[in-house]
Amino acid sequence: MKNMRILAIGAHPDDLEILCAGTLAKYSERKHKVFMAHLCNGDLGGKNITPAELARVRKIEAQKAAKLICAEELGGIASDLDLYADRETRKKVVDIIRYARPDVIFTHSPDDYMPDHVITSKLVFDAAFAATLPNYKTKSKVHESIVPIYYMDTMAGINFFPTDYVDITETTGIKKKMLLCHK
């Protein structure tokens, strides 16, 4: 099997660790290149800290978690709840996809419970197609093929009917360590 490029795009810095870190760890253990991107910077997820300081802390936490599986961490293009499925943001997501040049993408389900998760899903769906269009101009070189997208659980299990499962028994330990990077 050829070495694959795996791109996971979540809304917030800890979403991927919660929803698919075990799967990403399995890919990494098999020597595939893993990219972990988050579109929001995590600046609204705390109480006794300024949004700017929290965004800085969350970035460091995401980098530490990604490093545990030798993944490249990307993202933080918007503040929490300031993510919109507009042209400017879609182009930024296209650039993430074109940079990673993935063979497969993991992202939030369009039926998720949280607005940033739903918008992330929409942006990834649209950008995965746009990334393959030579005349859709961004800063990055066009990606040659449409990439399959797999949706992560909605956390609450609402409107989630999976067709594929990944047994992460052997990577549960590293998933826990990745989660512990987030305070």
Image (cartoon, helix red, strand yellow):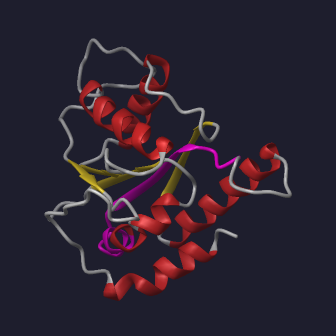
* Residue 97 in sight from this viewpoint: yes
Quarter of the image where the C terminus is located: bottom right
Above or below for 72 versus 18: above
* Left or right of residue 116: residue 125: left
Range of the magenta residues?
Answer: 25-43
Residue 3, horizontal then vertical, whole percent: 24, 60
Q: Residue at x 38, y 74 (%)?
A: 22
Q: Which of the two residues, 168 or 28, is positioned nearer the viewer here? A: 168
Quadrant where the N terminus is found in the figure: bottom left
Q: Nearer the viewer, residue 157 or 166?
A: 157
Taking the image as shown, residue 168 lies to the left or right of residue 89, namely left
Tell whether position 42 is magenta.
yes
Q: Nearer the viewer, residue 106 or 33?
A: 106
- In the image, residue 167 lies in the stretch drawn in magenta: no
Q: Position of residue 16 (x, y in %)?
A: 46, 60
Q: Quadrant of residue 153?
A: bottom left
Q: Position of residue 140 (x, y in %)?
A: 41, 25
Q: Tell me where residue 86 appears, x and y as whole percent.
A: 45, 20
Q: Is residue 71 visible?
A: no
Which of 28/111 is in front? 111
- Relative vertical location of residue 1 with respect to residue 129 in this rendering, above or below: below
Question: At x 31% / y 15%, what residue is drawn?
Answer: 136
- The picture quadrant where one finds residue 13 is bottom right
Is 172 drawn above or below residue 139 in the view shown? Answer: below
Question: Residue at horizontal 62%, vertical 66%?
Answer: 64
Query: Exactly how many numbered labels are in the figure?
Result: 0
